[in-house]
Amino acid sequence: MRFAVSLSSLTFLMVVGCSPQPEIDVEAERDALMSADRAWSEAYSASDSPADVFAAQFVDDGSLLPPDAPLARGKEAIHAAITGLEAMPGFSVTWAPDAADVGSGGDLGFTKGSYEIKMDSPEGPVTINGKYLTIWKKQADGTWLVTADMFNANGPPTPQT
């Protein structure tokens, strides 16, 4: 009997494992990620509550990996980190993706791009240009949410002209 159960289990696993997987339209998913990233940036820039918009784009246990700061895990910590940035005098940020890719399973992908931060420093207004990498996870409803976001500067801040 034990052998029969094991043979049945093995047969089931082989059938499930060898079943054809749904075809993933990778190009369409890349386009969806680029659109999601652009929409996120636009919503953030247009919002009266940008930290709310920023944190809402993350999965519940998502992570923000800012430069020179601790990891922020979870929407509450991400919201607090962005609120801290937003509180800096003269702070503004814009970003734009320049590429996206999706894994063969169609449920994980990434966008990468560039950002520009403007803020006031003791010496006057400065601009920080940098790059970012965002990991996205496709949700059951077909939308994409951020699971991890990481960014860093290309160099030191430069004075605004």
Image (cartoon, rainbow, N blue to C red):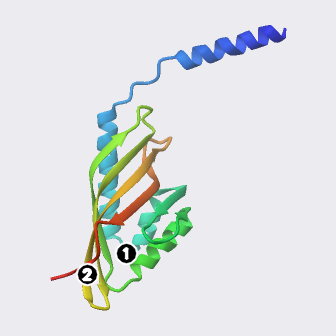
Q: Residue 27: x percent and y percent?
A: 29, 35
Q: Residue 65: percent from the left, percent from the top?
A: 46, 63
Q: Residues within 10 Å of mark 2 (few under 14, many from 20)?
A: some
The amino acid beneath tag 1 is: Asp
Q: Secondary structure at mark 1?
A: loop
The residue singled out by tag 2 in the image is: 126
Could you tell which of marks 1 and 2 lies nearer the N-terminus? 1
Task: Please say if 24 is above or below 9.
Answer: below
Placement of 84 over or under 63, stated as above or below: below
Q: Residue 48 — which label?
A: 1
Q: What amino acid is found at the position of numbered circle 2 in the picture?
A: Val
**Which residue is at 51% across, 59% downward?**
63
Report the Cα–Cα distance between label 1 and label 2: 23 Å
Residue visible at 25% across and 81% down in the picture: 126
Question: In this figure, what is the number of numbered marks?
Answer: 2
Identify which residue is drawn at 42% across, 50% down: 135
Q: Position of residue 101 (x, y in %)?
A: 34, 41
Q: Residue at x 33, y 79 (%)?
A: 91
The C terminus is located in which quarter?
Answer: bottom left
* Most distant residue in the front direction: 155
Query: Image check: 74 left or right of 31?
Result: right
Give how far across and how far down residue 7 sits, in percent. 72, 10
Please say if 156 is above or below 139.
below
